[in-house]
Amino acid sequence: MNIPLNHFCPEIIMIVAACIVALVGVAKSDAVRRSAQWISLISLILAFIAGVRIGMVDSTPAWPLASFATYDTLLASGIGILLVLLSWDMPFAMDPAKSDQTFRGEYFAMMLVSLAGVSMMAKVDNLIWLFIALELVSIPTYIMVATGRSNPTAQEAGIKYFFLGSLSAAVYLFGFSYLYGFSGSTDFSKIASAFAAAPQLPYIAIIGLLMVVIGIAYKIAAVPLHYYAPDVYQGTATPVTAFLSFAPKAAGFIALILVFNLTGWRLSHGAARAVPDLLMVMAVLSMTIGNVLALLQRNIKRMLAYSSISHSGYMLVGLAVGPLMISHSITNGVSAMLFYLGAYSVMTVGAFAVLVYLQGKPDAAEDLDDIAGIASAHPLAAACMAVCMLSLIGMPFTVGFLGKLFIVQAAFSSGHGALAVIVMINAAIAAAYYLSIITSMYLRDPWTPFAVRRPGAIQFSAAIAAALVILLGVFPSVLMSISRYSGTEVTNMVVVNNSQTPAVSKTTAGMPPISVARSRSNPPTISHSTPLAATHTRVAAAL
Amino acid sequence: MTQSHLILPMMLAIPLIGAALIFMIKPGTTGQRGRGLGILAFCFALIPSLMGIILLSRFNYATGGVWQQRFIYPWLPQFHVNFSFGVDAISLWLLMLTLLVTPLAILDAINKIQHRQNEFFAWMLIGYACMIGIFISHDVLLFYLFFETSLIPTFFILGIWGHSDRRKAAVKFFLYAFAGSVLLLASLIYLALVHQEKFGTFSFALADLYRAGQSLSPAQQGIVFLGLLIGFAIKVPLFPVHTWMPLAITESPTPGAVMIALVKLGAYGLLRFAIPMLPLAAVRFTPFLAVLCVISILYGGLISWVQRDMKKLIAYSVLSHLGLCILALLALTMTGLTGCVLVMISSGLLAAALLMVMGMIYRRYHTRNLLEISGLARRLPVLGFFAVFFFMGTAALPGLIGFISEIISLVGTYVSGSAGHGGYLGPAYAIPAALGMILGALYMLYWVAHVIFGPLVETVPDTDTASKHSPAVVQDLSVREWLVLSPLALAVLFLGLYPAPVLNSLQPAIGKIRHEVLAAVQEDTASRMAASSAATSRTHRVVAVHIAGMPVSATGSESQSLNKAVALRLPARLAR
């Protein structure tokens, strides 16, 4: 794949800004140090604009996954803007009174590096680069977790996060080595053709894939590698928690899509069945364990940690039915997953923004009792939180509802009715704990006097997130089109790769009843460029 | 184009605009501002009601089965989901009920809400818009959206302005309803996908889902029906899943309780969606559901007999009426289905009116305990009159709407399963239901005798409010309370004396729904019969005709016995 250099414009902007911020952020003068956050904000806005322009101008595909990469860039820089806003004026200072002395700009530098990693994720074309992009996302987060707060729990969280993170990196790197061993190359196109040439996926490749899935489960906080999430989310500073709930998760899911893409999604038959089966088991366990344990929590950050585990479960459902899905249709599991990823990021970051706003004192707004009755004193913050919670529940006219709708639809249309019903039952369980937050804010009398953080930027980011939740819930067409076309690109690869192999009929035979007719009606000889060109024009139109 | 009628979307938009406006006005510390907010909310609620009169005049009653005043605007074109509005006769009358009662509930609440008035009236208007939306949605996904969204305003009204146990009641209300509705959504998505698989487009349009649901095999229909049933049965509510409702109605402030008791969402959903979409499953589940309905009726009656809390009394009587409503629906006779819609209207009207009367008594005496007050007619003759009037309506006094609706439902259930009527129920269900209704009348009469006409007993209200509310200064109805109760009383009386316009206009719409069910069942039976042996073919053809409720050629006695046999056997056969 030859990716034109201008497509890396957003990442270049972010990395250059990160370097500047790292220099500026340690300056002696407080005013200069504080300019770090403005530079970060402006660079992310520029990166976002660059991403939009690349998506718009490029009506012919520069490479097969161009709109997937555009989506990734827009997600990283867009959510990045919200994350910078919610960390305004307060990194490394749990006590806002002392923030003058303790403001350290390098927090933003690490944030930018990590976001650049997320943004680059969909543009890699080599296993080595994939690993580098994943580590680019992860390593800054280790530092952010450990230094985000000056108390021992943050140190504990940092150590836990670092050691388990390194372990998981070792696991997926080991998985990559199997893929290399199978194909003899780290280059994506070579690996893909090796997969395409093999009539049956060999065990060595399947073992590699399984290890990659398990390793990346850590990044997305899915069962069985979810144990760290509650402790780390609770232990570290809330802006860092917000960052953790977005960046590693987005990066992990995109990495999984890329790895499955190598196989041409030929995972529905033979021994390769193990991969979607594993994904499904992980999905069901993540949803159920996440939601049931969240029910037991009184600490909001811990509750949101379990909630993020369960949302990984929902997205894994989309991914698991992805390999089996109907190739041309709207119910593509990968599209549904990508839509859900965007929806989840907006609503969960909005919820954390409100929490940050409410933490005007150290250790405030940790417990459900702490936020009792805040609706009367802080109506806007409470309203933003309520909107995000209702969206996480999946109430209509929020983006969370559409996300669940698409996931369930994808699960049904691939013949996994049981999975769809499990998603729905979990949505009902989840409603209980999200509702307890709303109940606490609106239906109870104030418990303790409250101090909030002063910077308007925090409230602003919460308000933007809440507005986006509703806007995307009522007018979802932009997010829908771009996630749909990104998913379609991935699926187009299926057809192309299948046409090169004798195993086409097997793929079709392995599919469940509903999808058989669809995939047969889709000519396997479809060329690479035509649908992609069409896709790109449509993405441009959507933008 | 006929699809550009703006009246329905405007009806939906005006309360929402009002809600946004009112939400932004701070209530202030004096009661004056709160009062102004209430009046503003009332005006915004009244506009849709006035538009309702225009709608009544524009509606073509001869073709009441056709969706009229359509408005279509694409929302998610990729999914063929549209903002698609319209009304047929059934939704027209239920819409009218909402348009009549909700503004009165808001009028009743002015001055009664002591804090956060702006939020309260905004939530009331949002709830109002959701209720309108539910009845005018032609697209099933849209119906679901309003159905689900209506939980939020009720949750907040119940949880913020409710009585002592409000938080538990609000959470229980929300979780019950939400748990049911997620399975409902799963079923709807599945049906839409079935439509895509069999007919080419992914669609949530009503007719498309009817077609998709009916094309499924009985076993598949059973699973999908179960999903819909759980959602709607919780919302109705039916016996084992009813526990949220008495709690919610008791703990809610009067307007919230009126909203909960007014809209018969579950019954409407079963009538409009579950039964015509999945007729074979519906028929198969009929005996099971009918037993639950009868239990609801008897259970509601028995509980309210020993109930000493005014609002709980009404809540259980609503439970009992809704049992009858669903029973009449399951009867699948023209009479029964008409009765079902009428019970929705009458129970909505009467329960709302009674809850408001109770609210008025509560405001005066600060107690809901029936043993603490009696002889109100001596102190409050006008309020006493209205209380007696609405209680008599609930106890089915001839001449009031309660009587008409109950008698039609019971007759519909009784004749169900007999020759020429179709349906699968019969006297075995109608007689216990009638007993339950008599039970209801008994406790109502007992209560009225005690509270209204007994010896004068008044409670001493709480000490802090004693100066304002001591028995010496308890006043009879204010002008505003007159305005609230008299339209309801007129409606109860008018529909009781002259229900013909409603009954007649309902016939085409009900006939259409009934036809969907019976045609599908007949087709299914016929196809099964075709496969059976030649010796039995004649009998079975007669059977098929019977099910469709058409006249038969066989002699009376033969057809009677045959029909009974079929009524008993058919569900079992479908189950195979």
Image: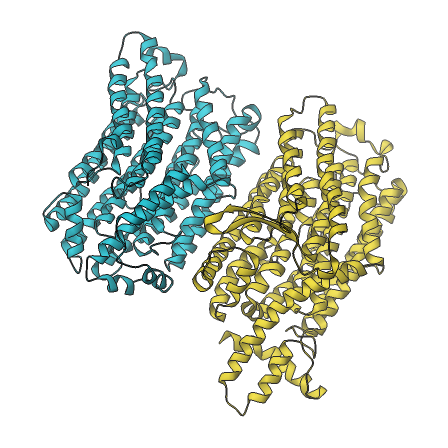
Chain colours: A cyan, B yellow
Residue at 31% in and 41% down: A68
x and y percentages locating residue B488 in the rendered image: 80, 47
Labels in figure, total: 0
Extreme residue in the top direction: A29
- Name the spot of residue B516 as percent of width and height, x first: 60, 67
Please tell me which residue lies in front, A38 or B560.
A38
Residue A27 against residue A439 in the figure, above or below: above
Image-quadrant location for residue B569: bottom right
Residue found at x 46% / y 58%: B201
Q: Is residue B107 above or below residue B99?
A: above
- Residue at screen point 78% across, 39% down: B360
Viewed as shown, does residue A81 lie left or right of B77?
Answer: left
Question: For this view, does A16 lie left or right of residue A471?
Answer: left
Q: Position of residue B464 (x, y in %)?
A: 74, 27
Front-most of B375 and A255?
A255
**In screen coordinates, is A521 left or right of B397?**
left
The residue at 53%/60% (across/down) is B209
A408 and A162: which one is in front?
A408
Q: Quadrant of residue B63?
A: bottom right
Whether residue B286 is visible: yes
In the displayed structure, does residue B265 sit left or right of residue B405? left
Question: Residue A329, located in which quarter of the rendered image?
Answer: bottom left
Tell me, yes or no, if residue A437 can be seen here. Answer: no
x, y percent for residue B457: 84, 42
